[in-house]
Image (cartoon, rainbow, N blue to C red):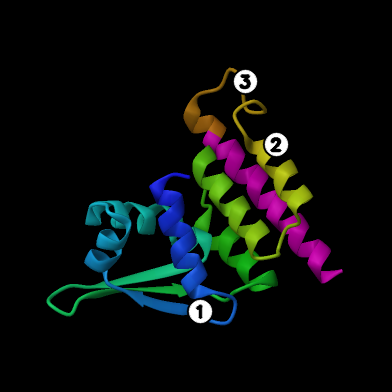
Amino acid sequence: MRISDSIENFIKEMLGEDSHEVELRRNELAEYFGCAPSQINYVLATRFSPSQGYMTESHRGGGGYIRIVRVVETGPQKMAYLVRDRIGDSISEEEALRIIGHLRDSGNATETEASLMAAALGGKAMAVPLTPEVKNALRARMLKSMILALANKQNA
């Protein structure tokens, strides 16, 4: 298991099912895992972003800490946020897969639905002679349509 995965799992275990917030000290966490503090920053930026349902705050100084808050937004509210504010007119494959993973992890999409969405938006399906910009615009429109279909399913 990669160190980034270990750090992510450790933080998610600290959050647990009942807690929506955790405070950590970057240097202590880096010392615990035997890595540089920049590795902690990398994990926070890539694994605990708003598109994955987390907000992070960093307080610097002698008593500085990092606060990670899990955004408890599910169902239609989460779907509306993704379509309206998060996806936009263009989205990369990597970011689309992060959003799909969050939909699965939050229970807004089943494992099967998430797998189908990822396959439809992935590199193999998008291997057509188009510029990357056009592919990302097409991917955004497709992802929005998929999310709206999930929202309609939940409302039924």
The answer to which quarter of the image holds residue 120 is top right
Q: How far apart, in angstroms, are the residues tagged by discs 1 and 3?
A: 42 Å
Q: Is residue 140 magenta?
A: yes
Which residue is the site of mark 1?
Answer: 20
Residue lying farthest left?
Answer: 62
Give the SS element for disc 3.
loop
- How many residues crowd around disc 2 within 10 Å: few (fewer than 14), some, or many (20 or more)? some
Say which label, 2 or 3, has the lower sequence index: 2
> Which residue: 74% across, 42% down?
116
Q: Mark 3: which amino acid?
A: Val
Q: Are marks 1 and 3 in contact (CB under 8 Å)?
A: no
Q: How far apart, in angstroms, are the residues tagged by discs 2 and 1?
A: 32 Å
In the image, the segment drawn in magenta is 136-156
Which residue is the site of mark 2?
Answer: 120
Q: Main secondary structure of the magenta part?
A: helix
Q: Mark 2: which amino acid?
A: Ala
Is residue 44 rendered to the left or right of residue 81? left
Q: Is residue 4 magenta?
A: no
- Is residue 91 among the parts visible in the rendering? no
Q: Mark 1: which amino acid?
A: His
> Which residue: 26% across, 75% down?
65
Q: How far apart, in angstroms, are the residues tagged by discs 2 and 3?
A: 13 Å
Say which label, 1 or 3, has the lower sequence index: 1
Q: Quadrant of the C terminus?
A: bottom right
Is residue 144 rendered to the left or right of residue 66? right
